[in-house]
Amino acid sequence: MKSKSLIVFSIPILVIFGILMGSIFIVQQTQQTLVLEFGKLIRVIKEPGLFMKIPFLQNVRSYDNRILDFDLPAIPATLADQKRLLVDTFARYKIVDPALFYRTVQNEEGAEQRLRILNQSIALSVLGQVKLTDVLSPKRSEIAKSIRDQMNAAAKAFGIEVVDLQLRGTDLPIENSEAIFNRMISERKQEAQEFRSRGDEMAQEIKSTADKERTIILAEATKKSETIRGQGDAYVTQTAAATYGQDIKFYDFYRSMNAYKSALNHETTTFILSPKDDFFKYLNR
């Protein structure tokens, strides 16, 4: 009799406990939660804590409020210079409007499906306006930023913010790799030949200008030196004439003494002259 009474007494307690547990739910620090009543949105909770709901009538759906990583599939793209690439990207996104997110994409799988579609169309559009050299240069980050900004603008309709997008890999299709490499080598050789031709042309111009300036400088220097030499010779002649004119006999004697000194020494060749020759006129006196 007591056991039956205990069972009868326990059933209401269990029902009350079940109702109480069904009406309480917890929102974690990393969550944002929607309270739904027969699929209709009743309340949005973004703060962590303990909350109440109507059991059996209402249910909750929680979404992560952290930044989520998402690997996007590689897509073949044709660039502005008609080169083809396989572009591998990854994105990071965040659910900023859980109510709009629920109404449009329902869950993360639906959101990632929409992001794949957006990435494919936007990435193809952006990459179709750039060249291969841009993708392989520091402009790569600007290209990724342009794709991210356009995806973010479109993803706002789903309550999503695209926080980051990076071009993780840009590979050439296997069937086109060799042809593209050969074309790149040919273009680089052509550019190198153009640079060499321009360099040779500039070198010839510089050399020609230098030769012309050298000729002008030498001509001016020669002219100036001849002028100075002529002025010096004129001054020497004038000075000598003035000096010699003061005592012609002494000058004649002085020149004869120098001639004797140069001719009559042990290193000169022997020669025979008449003692009465005019050369010895000062020796005969």
Image (cartoon, rainbow, N blue to C red):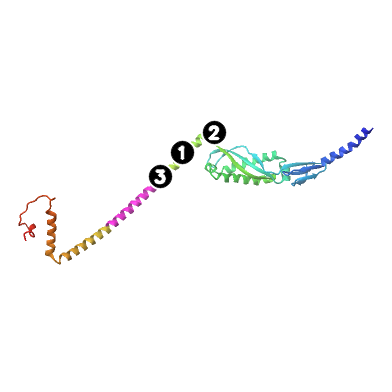
Nearest the eye: 159 or 52: 52
Q: Residue furthest right?
A: 1
The location of residue 37, given as percent across then percent down, is: 80, 42
Q: Which residues are magenta?
A: 195-222
Q: Which quadrant, please, contains the N terminus?
A: top right
The location of residue 243, given as percent across then percent down, is: 17, 65
Q: Residues within 10 Å of mark 2 (few under 14, many from 20)?
A: few
What amino acid is labelled 2 in the image? Answer: Ile
- Give the spatial CA distance, label 2 vs label 3: 36 Å
The label number, if any, that marks residue 197 in the structure image: 3
What amino acid is labelled 1 in the image? Answer: Ser
Q: Earlier in the sequence, mark 3 or mark 1?
A: 1
What amino acid is labelled 3 in the image? Answer: Ser
Mark 2 highlights which residue?
174
Mark 1 highlights which residue?
186
229 sits to left or right of 81: left
Residue 3, by quadrant, is top right
Q: Please say if the residues under marks 3 and 1 sit with CB atoms less than 8 Å apart.
A: no
